[in-house]
Image (spheres, rainbow, N blue to C red):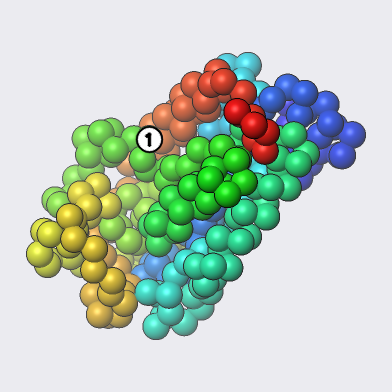
Amino acid sequence: MKVNLGNYTWEEVKDLSDKDPVVLLPLGAFEQHGKHLPLKVDEFMVNNIANESVKKSHQKNINAVVAPVIWSGYSPHHMDFPGTISIKDETLTNVILDIVESLVKNKLERILILNGHGGNIAILKNVGQKLKYDKNIYIATASYWDFAMKEINEWRDSDLGGINHACEMETALMLHMQEEIVKKDKIVDNPLKRSSYTGVDLLSGGSVGVSASFKELSDHGVIGSPSLASKKKGTELYEIITDKVSDFIEDFSKWAKPLNGKNE
């Protein structure tokens, strides 16, 4: 089975839909990641993780395929840094709705939207509800790190505040995926220090939501401890995350077939 939906012909997609595959729709962002990482980090990493997770699923004889990545996301909090491209929340919502409805119309109905950017999370939750209650379309949504929270906590060397943005985790994963593009001489640590109620770490969200521009929190765009990253650690974490996502794909493939757009 091919990994990428874009490599299928329309005739092959008809045959593929009969197999009721799990369809991964990667959702990223295009935004600053400090001075040491490129703008493409979120869309590049989530697409890479989706592809590897599907490859591992194929090794377990699970039908799965990756749809084209949505490369830009909701990033107004990064717009003070040059190069960031942000999509309005309503625009991103409609893009996702249109893509999902197109997949469902073509009988590709077992859909997981795999997210790679924190700023998309609230929108993605709303999209899942809109699809269900407005369109009677049922999908699954998650960020790739959600599948390995326990393991990431055990893997990390940083204290709380070290995993947030352009941080220990993202830098390690990029060192594994494309080491030559990481500017190691420009790595700067900036663990966030503020009230624990507002959350300082990807793995420890606060109980109070507060919106802030990244420029208010970091002059250079980093929040976390990227100096603790290494290629070896990135390879280890990449295998953990893709194993965990693949485990979910296998589980998701066994759920009752969605009755998308039909009366339940």
Label 1: which residue? Answer: 147
- Placement of 196 over or under 112, stated as above or below: below
Q: Is residue 9 visible?
A: yes
Apparent side of residue 92 relative to residue 15 in the rendered image (left or right): left
Closest to the observer, 232 or 173: 173
Image coordinates of residue 176 in percent, x first then y, are 44, 46
Question: Would residue 104 appear left or right of 192 to someone viewing this image?
Answer: right
Residue 151 left/right relative to 88: left
Above or below, comparing residue 183 to residue 25 in the picture: below
Q: Is residue 175 visible?
A: no
**Residue at 17% of width from left, 55% of height from top?**
207
Query: Where residue 119 sits in the image (x, y, percent)?
Result: 40, 62
- As drawn, which residue projects farthest toward the left? 195
Relative to 170, is 60 above or below? above
Q: Residue at x 60, y 28 (%)?
A: 264
At x 52%, y 72%, the residue is 88
Taking the spot 66% from the left edge, 24% from the top edge, the residue there is: 63
Secondary-structure class at tag 1: helix
For label 1, count other residues whose C-alpha is less than 10 Å away and answer few (under 14), some (14-19) or many (20+): some
**Total marks placed:** 1
Image coords of residue 121 (percent x, y): 41, 54
- Judge by depth and name the residue closer to the eye, 262 or 94: 262
Coordinates of residue 23 in the picture (x, y in percent): 63, 36
Q: Quadrant of the N terminus?
A: top right
The kind of residue tagged 1 is: Phe
Of all residues shown, which one is farthest toward the right?
11
Q: Which residue appears farthest toward the front when viewing the image?
A: 263
